[in-house]
Amino acid sequence: MSAQRENGRGRADEGGSRGGGLTTGEVARRLGVAPTTVRTWDRRYGLGPDERTGGRHRRWSAGDVARLERMCAMTATGMPPAEAARLARSEKSPTTAARSRSATGAPRPSNRPRSRAGSGLQLGDARQECRGIARAALRLDAAALDELLLAAIDEHGLVAAWTEVIVPTLQAVGRKWQTSGERYVEVEHFLSWHVSGALRRATPHTVADRPGATTVLACVPGENHTLPLEVLSAALTERGVPVRMFGGALPVESLVAAVRRTGPAAVGLWAQSRTTASRPLAQHVAAMEWGVRGARRRPAVLTLGPGWAGQAVAGLARPSGLAEAVAALTSAVSSRSL
């Protein structure tokens, strides 16, 4: 019976699957809201499916989803939900519009402009999850955003979720506020905070230290963009690599002290901007030594982030992305542990 029910769902990429439409969960993921939100809109505002099947399970057609997308678009601009629902219901769905064609076969004109659920975010060919996450961020919907971020990490894995889902969404939100003056800055901060929280929940366990196998991660002085380092820390932890994360703008003296105290196999230094990337600092850390005479050890130092472009340090690796950084640091730790 359960297999039969699962097969009945189908894949309704366009809202009209062999299984009779999308489930409420599928609709919620597409819109970037929690399933409870979809059910509340149905119960409170009458935005449920036009046609209901027997039993408790709802099936949503393309027209039903389009109506909910209009609802999302209007609430994302700050419109009260009740008013947004009234306007969403008043706009005709594609099915209804087809039925109301004039005798000549031409569709009746509408003076109401079509709304877009993305609120102008330029996501291009990004994955569908990006649009859902962006919509949740624009609405400042914390519960939906957490659910969608964790679902993306669970489905694609940490590295792919970051590269293919989270980064494109962050970039789209960043472009939005850059072209809108000071608007939407709160959306970027809100999204970044929830991404950080999702990374911590996805990797809850800290890996215990192993002598000579620790990785130190820190932003260079003056650099406060910690999110890329946070995902790198999470990815290394996921692979069983001990990590000591020191976050943003670590002073030079504190960085040197942290390296001396931990004796790490590798050090990752993040610089988002060329103005913060410091070649002398990277060279100094790479030259640090510890251990008994005759068996002195140095850390493998990686320069991470776009700030190091054009600031290459001889002998130090500069991975081009998250996957490369994870591979390089994992390899450095493995070679030092032998």
Image (spheres, rainbow, N blue to C red):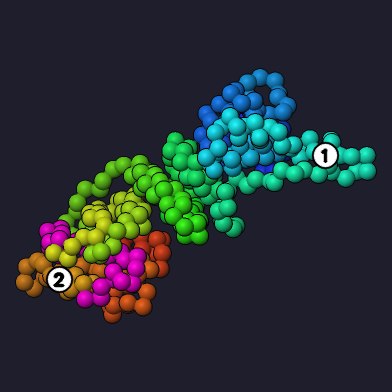
The residue positioned farthest toward the top in the image shown: 55
* Label at residue 288: 2
Q: Is 260 in the magenta?
A: yes
Q: Quadrant of residue 25?
A: top right
Q: Which residues are magenta?
A: 254-280
- Say left or right for 156 vs 96: left
- Picture coordinates of residue 97, whole percent (x, y): 80, 38
The residue positioned farthest toward the left in the image shown: 293
Comparing 91 with 316, the one in front is 91
Can residue 199 be seen by looking at this rendering?
no
- Say left or right for 131 vs 94: left
Residue drawn at (21%, 72%) of the image: 281
Comparing 307 with 41, the one in front is 41
Give the class, few, some or many, for how many residues have Cα within 10 Å of label 2's Cα (few <14, many ≥20): some
- Picture coordinates of residue 150, whole percent (x, y): 44, 42
Can residue 97 be seen by looking at this rendering?
yes
Query: Which image quarter is the N terminus in?
Result: top right
